[in-house]
Image (spheres, rainbow, N blue to C red):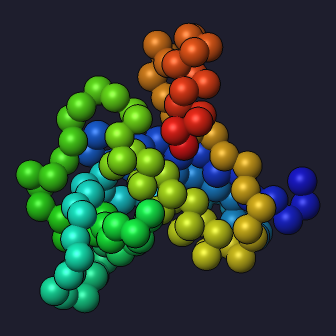
Amino acid sequence: MENTVLIAVDAGKDTTKYVYKNELGVLQKESFRTKVQEADNFGADVQGKTFKIQLEDKNYMIGDMVSESKLNYDLSKTSIEHKLCVYVAIAKVVLETGINKVKLAVGIPANIYKNEQLKNEYKQYM
């Protein structure tokens, strides 16, 4: 698996956590807030753990600078918020390591993991 980075991501309701090994083989743990807002005009430079991304012709801001009211407490993991946060975690690791071949493990609730149909639907969603 040379030149492959292993990433584990848990996009939780409040915080997205992820872990990977850096180029020295040291385990790195990072996190950012799972707050997502669609925004065409950001109006300010993003700071801290805030990220601007574009997906399917829509612009989003993710992280600290997004209002607390944008937290999504829905039990579903197939939300745009969770998908975008997983993508941001992957992008951050690829930028940090310079390795663009990724093996990904994503945290999901046990009820999805134990149900083949739900598990396959989730894989397709991601």
Q: Position of residue 40 (x, y in %)?
A: 23, 76
- Whether residue 51 is visible here, answered yes or no, is no
Near-viewer residue (16 or 60): 60
Position above or below: 47 against 118: below
Q: Which residue sits at x=85%, y=65%?
A: 3
Q: Is residue 10 left or right of residue 80?
A: right
Quarter of the figure with residue 60: bottom left
Does residue 65 sit above or below 36 in this rendering? below
Q: In the figure, residue 97 lies in which quadrant?
A: bottom right
For the C terminus, the image quarter is top right
Residue 99 lies, in percent from the top left, at 75, 70
Residue 52 left/right relative to 111:
left
Residue lying at 44% horizontally and 48% vertically, measured from the top left: 83
Can residue 1 be seen here?
A: yes
Residue at the spot 28% in from the left edge and 81% down from the top edge: 47
Q: Residue furthest left?
A: 69
In x, y percent, where is residue 65? 19, 70
The quadrant of the image that shows the N terminus is bottom right
Residue 114 occupies which quadrant of the picture?
A: top right
